Image (cartoon, rainbow, N blue to C red):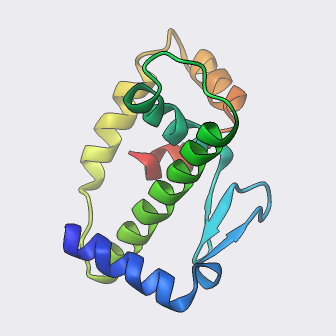
Amino acid sequence: MKCVASALLVAALTLGIHSVVSADQESAAVVVNGVRIMPWEAEREFRNLLPQTSFHRRLEGERRTELERQAFDALVMKELKRQWAVEEGLSVDASSVDRELTAIRQRFPDLTAYRQAMAERKMSEDGLRRAI
């Protein structure tokens, strides 16, 4: 998988990352080959990096900007890998995704609370399904 990631990164850099990624199309944080990555996805990725890097310190300035860039880079690479997998005919079993989505929904007391949490985070079920 590292070879695939490296090849995708080299291809993106060779083609010019601007041809693969464009910013802020219809409230997307970034667009990768036409696929919108939403701000909540970028925020989630950023928060995933925090425990690894901050050691409970407050992040400011250049360090925060650097981590935000790392989060965006990670999201772009994940999307490029997903697109490559689709091109190669690889897929995740839909029932596995459905089970995970059901498990997430069950963390909430009811469907209204689930939908409210999704709305507060500006998440769509399609985006959550893609993230799974």
Image position of 25 with respect to 50: above or below: below
Outermost residue on the top side: it is 109
Looking at the rendering, in which quadrant would you find the C terminus?
top left
Q: Residue at x 58, y 86 (%)?
A: 16
Image position of 107 with respect to 53: above or below: above
Residue 113 screen position, x and y as percent: 61, 16
* Total tally of numbered discs in the picture: 0
Residue 35 screen position, x and y as percent: 59, 68
Outermost residue on the bottom side: it is 15
Q: Residue at x 37, y 31 (%)?
A: 52
Place residue 117 in its image quadrant.
top right
Residue 116 screen position, x and y as percent: 67, 22
Depth check, front residue: 17 or 44: 17
Image position of 13 with respect to 51: above or below: below
Image position of 34 with respect to 75: above or below: below
Outermost residue on the front side: it is 62
Place residue 85 in its image quadrant.
bottom left
Left or right position of 111 against 129: right
Depth check, front residue: 93 or 56: 56
Q: Residue at x 70, y 31 (%)?
A: 119
Q: Residue at x 64, y 51 (%)?
A: 38
Looking at the rendering, in which quadrant would you find the N terminus?
bottom left
Place residue 48 in its image quadrant.
top left
Left or right position of 36 against 26: left
Residue 125 screen position, x and y as percent: 55, 43
Depth check, front residue: 73 or 130: 73
